[in-house]
Amino acid sequence: MTQPDESASCSKEMSVQDNELPQPQNSNHLSTAPLKDKLLTNSSYLAAEIPLKFGHFMSNLWTSSSELSSSFFVHNGGQDAPPPQVIWLMGRPYYTTADKMDRMQLAILDAQKNDMFKPSPKDNQDDDLSPDTTTLLWPPDFYEDFTSRLWMTYRHNYPPIRPSNHKTDIGWGCMLRSGQSLLSNALLIHFLSRDWTRQKSGLGNFKIYSRIIHWFFDELSPRAPFSIHRIALLGKQLGKNIGEWFGPSTISQVIQALVSDYPPANMSVYIATDGVIYRNDVYDIATGKRPRGDFTYLSTRVMPKQDENGRQEAKHLYEASSLTPDEMANVDESEGDFKPVLILVALRLGIDSLHPTYHPALKACFEIPSFVGIAGGRPNSSLYFIGLQGDELIYLDPHFSRPALETKSLSDYSKQDFSSYHCTLPRKINIANIDPSMLLGFYCRTLSDFNALCDQLKLVSQMHTPIVTVEQEAPEYDEDVRSENDFGIMSDEDEEDDDMF
């Protein structure tokens, strides 16, 4: 199914340093950095994550030698040409062959094995591989698509997240950043279409692309409606202290509130309940018949009364950084029309690990055209999964710290300024090693797209053990069981889910 390109009409809806921390040594985002430098983990990440996540980092950041036989970097020693292999990236297939183990792959594996924690000599770079050669390891069309996806990572040296003093989210913001990645890539498709890539972006599209990134800047202001500051403040209203990890359920509720409170996004958000998508509820939300609701009823249950002042302060700061009523009124919204909808499905597919019976259905989701990724991860570390090759998931890792961008006029930013929002090195993890708690995302531009998604999910459920099901309408409950505030929102946050990230 091919989604229509409506970037022109969508674009009309778009209106409107602190140097205390050291510059990180990681140079993944610099196009001029030697490839070997890009393979070294960044110092800010290590300081925040060791020792809790060291084992997972070493076992999953790169394909281990024991997994090479089934990885993308496999070498076929036989005489016959290897069969084509498909790589899925957010619903798009790309094809390659398995005979790509050459000097560059060997150099990469050698670098990650021997130099993971050694800085590269700055005066001897004769043996470093050119960053451009990385593209030869992947199908060119896949690599162009992958490097065009938005990558939200830790940032530092941004204004404090009031009422706390946090100037960085290193060590606690990985699920917040994974949620930002999922939302930002849905917005890219929403405004620029699934066919858009950075390499082929014209001037008009670059302005739209720049504004989308600007929406995620690390500041508390109306021009950054999806910032880490506003996410943390909404989390505070949901019972999560600033600096505390989020789980899939919390980040789904926050994304819904953020988008609902920013009409220029021209998008609705639906949250599935217990892995079930109710078609009537999606239609009501997409046509504006059902608002996002209020967090007050939930926060009073999950927060102690003595913290009520902190919640109220967070709510005040959040509302002060929102658009004014007059600005809201200037946004043209046609009530009754089916607005593009982002469907979020928070799941737990196992107890301590992802149960193997769910592997086939989860892998099938990557082939659905409306799929926009998974905010999940491995135990204690959130990752954003966007691709699939065999049994390995391709992901964007938020655990790299970048300095917050300097605040200036939107027209003054260049492509190079935004390079740190794109990853040039695909990473993979075996599906058996991921955490069972996750948040799936699907973007449907039209009612026809939504109907197609429902048909595809039903087909997946018929072929495999279902993970997401579709029903016409939600069952009726008595008022003391289901309140009007419960629509599309999971009633209770599973604390064990949050502990995973």
Image: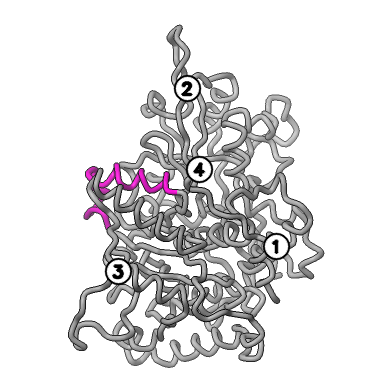
| Residue 273 - label | 3
Magenta residues (range): 348-368
Give the residue at mark 1.
208
- For badge 3, the amino acid type reads Thr
N-terminal-most mark, 1 or 2: 2
Q: Comparing marks 2 and 3, which lies closer to the viewer?
A: 3
Give the residue at mark 4.
92
Q: Is residue 412 left or right of residue 61?
A: right
Marks 2 and 3, how far apart at CA = 41 Å
| Residue 98 - label | 2
N-terminal-most mark, 2 or 4: 4
Q: Residue at x 40, y 64 (%)?
A: 344
Marks 1 and 3, how far apart at CA = 33 Å
Q: Is residue 182 magenta?
A: no
N-terminal-most mark, 2 or 3: 2
Q: Secondary structure at mark 4?
A: strand
- For badge 4, the amino acid type reads Arg
Mark yes or no: residue 495 visible: no
Q: Quadrant of the C terminus?
A: bottom left
Q: Comparing marks 1 and 2, which lies closer to the viewer?
A: 1
Crowding around mark 4 (Cα neighbors within 10 Å: few <14, some 14 to 19, many 20+) is some
Mark yes or no: residue 454 visible: yes
In the image, 404 versus 435, the foreground residue is 435
